[in-house]
Amino acid sequence: MRIIRDYQFVEQQDRGASVAIGNFDGVHRGHQSVIDLARAAAPQAPLGVMTFEPHPRAFFAPDAPPFRLMSPEARASRLEKLGVERLYQLNFNAALSGLPPEDFARKVISEGLGLTHVVVGADFCFGKGRSGTAADLQRFGAEMGFGVTIAPLMEHSSDTVSSTAIRTALSEGRPRDAAAMLSHWHRIEGEVIGGEQRGRDLGYPTANMSIDGLHPPAFGVYAVLVDVLDGPHRGSYQGAASIGVRPMFDGSHPNIETFLFDFTGNLYGATLSVALVDYLRPEMKFDGLEALIAQMDGDCARARHILDAEAPAELRAST
């Protein structure tokens, strides 16, 4: 997959794509349906996605609480797995956000990227002040020579599939409900960083990762599937992870600490992808280390049971 970040300097091989436009945070089922429409609209054209960095919401409200389900790197990895060949990850800045809707259609979509077809959701807004609608884009496409498909909002059970609904499920400790809307496990990806090594002292060495910038799931302990994406220990593992501030040790900054079952080795600097499968319990403060270790023993036994009981095909289907 090729990543294009500037619509003003585009190689010929990156023009002519059929593109789904949106933020694609989480790459959920609704996003995937829009991508499928882009694939079907022009089967001979490269399949593309247009998105924006930073996320427009973060650009306009930089001090707002973290809300993202995915880092840009995790999103790119997920899109590539779906067969996306061109990722137009445009720099969202004052100049781009200030373009009137017609200028965005002409300068970015038509002249800049030379797109053949675009697909947007029914609630899509674009241009300065979010003043352009999906219907406006359809009209501009007819005038400028690119096709436009408007995708209906997707329903899942009684609720619309959305990043907001997924964030709610994660906040309430319902990772399986989030996975049903995503069509894959919700994953936290990042580099393993140094910690205080308390887990090692307790007999449970953990791989520590930051969750800065991401929407925090419910704090507590989870049964997880772990992919080590690089380094000498690359592979897939089962484990248990704690997300939160570690109240037993008076922590204040949330992170994720993952214990990999049946693993020995050094993971510092490696990139991990941790899939949340089941929420086991909330964060707790214990009377002493013995009580904490006993609880960790129980947590890991329960996580092993949950993960071993999963049919391998089901686990693969929700990777």
Image (cartoon, grey):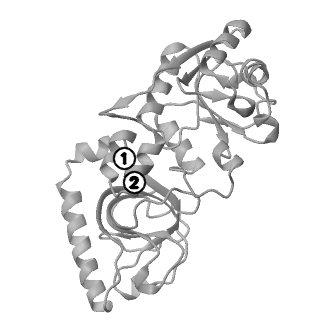
Q: Is residue 215 among what the camera can see?
A: yes
Q: Quadrant of residue 253?
A: bottom right
Residue drawn at (39%, 41%) of the image: 182
Q: Where is 23 relative to 232, above or below?
A: above
Question: What count of labels does the image hold?
Answer: 2
Q: Is residue 279 left or right of residue 109?
A: left
Q: Position of residue 125 (x, y in %)?
A: 63, 28
Q: Quadrant of residue 10?
A: top right
Q: Secondary structure at mark 1?
A: helix
- Asked whether 261 or 116 is in front, the reply is 116
Q: Position of residue 129 (x, y in %)?
A: 72, 33
What residue does disc 1 label?
Answer: 178
User: Which disc is residue 101 wearing?
Assistant: none
Residue drawn at (49%, 41%) of the image: 78
Mark 2 or mark 1: which comes first in sequence?
A: 2
Q: Secondary structure at mark 2?
A: helix
Residue drawn at (20%, 51%) of the image: 310
Locate the N terminus and report the quarter of the image it occupies: top right
- Label 2, label 1: how many angstroms apart (C-alpha)? 6 Å
Q: Is residue 7 left or right of residue 177?
A: right
Q: Where is 257 relative to 286, above or below?
A: above
- Asked whether 236 or 91 is in front, the reply is 91
Number of residues whose C-alpha sits closer than 10 Å to that of mark 2, classed few (under 14), some (14–19) or many (20 or more): many
Q: Is residue 43 among what the camera can see?
A: no
Residue drawn at (50%, 81%) of the image: 251
Q: Amino acid at mark 1?
A: Ala
What residue does disc 2 label?
Answer: 170
Q: Is residue 149 left or right of residue 130?
A: left
Q: Amino acid at mark 2?
A: Leu
Q: Are marks 2 and 1 in contact (CB under 8 Å)?
A: yes
Q: Where is 186 relative to 280, above or below?
A: above
